[in-house]
Image (spheres, rainbow, N blue to C red):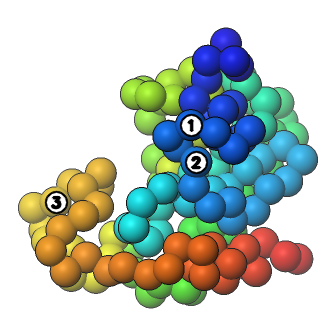
Amino acid sequence: MPDSCVICAKHRGTGPLVGPVVWAGELVVVSHRPGAFPGYLFVETRRHVANLDGLTEAEALGVARAAWVAARALRAELEPESVHSAMAGRGLARAHFHQHVFVRHRGTPGELGWMDVDWPGAPRVDLDLLCGRLSAHFAG
């Protein structure tokens, strides 16, 4: 499965999901969603495992800490209306554990759902610069 897994490919630097890496540890990687929308991160295990209950204790602790730091970093750097997290386990990357940590920017139209990240007037930033600032929150 790892050869055909889009997240395993992403960790090798290939495929449609490659985005700027915010932080990489021994067990967990945090990266930004590709595209122009700022504030949508993925917390992923390096090991190919499908579900939360399949994580080792060390991986679960690593994921929890990474998601917590990611949420605090997004709040500090983007000052959004709110920061959310989800583990959905469906879609393109359903066979590899990943947790979404994402913002809802101030001014987001109320009728937009959590996956609707683009609208007229949506904020835009240089993602590489943003990810560099987010990365600094993981040091320590």
Residue holding disc 1: 15
- Residue 94, placed above or below residue 83: above
Instruction: Say whether marks 3 and 2 touch (CB < 8 Å).
Output: no
Neighbor class of circle 2 (other Cα within 10 Å; few <14, some 14-19, many 20+) is some
Quadrant position of residue 12: top right
Query: Residue 108 shows which numbered tag?
Result: none
Q: Amino acid at mark 2?
A: Val
Image quarter (top left, top right, bottom left or bottom right) of the C terminus? bottom right
Inter-mark Cα distance, 3 to 2 = 25 Å
Query: Residue 18 shows which numbered tag?
Result: 2
Residue holding disc 3: 112
For mark 2, give the secondary structure.
loop
Quadrant position of residue 59: top right
- Residue 95, placed above or below residue 74: above
Residue 8 at x, y percent in the picture: 69, 31
Residue drawn at 63 percent across, 56 percent down: 31
Residue 27 at x, y percent in the picture: 84, 43
Q: Earlier in the sequence, mark 3 or mark 1?
A: 1
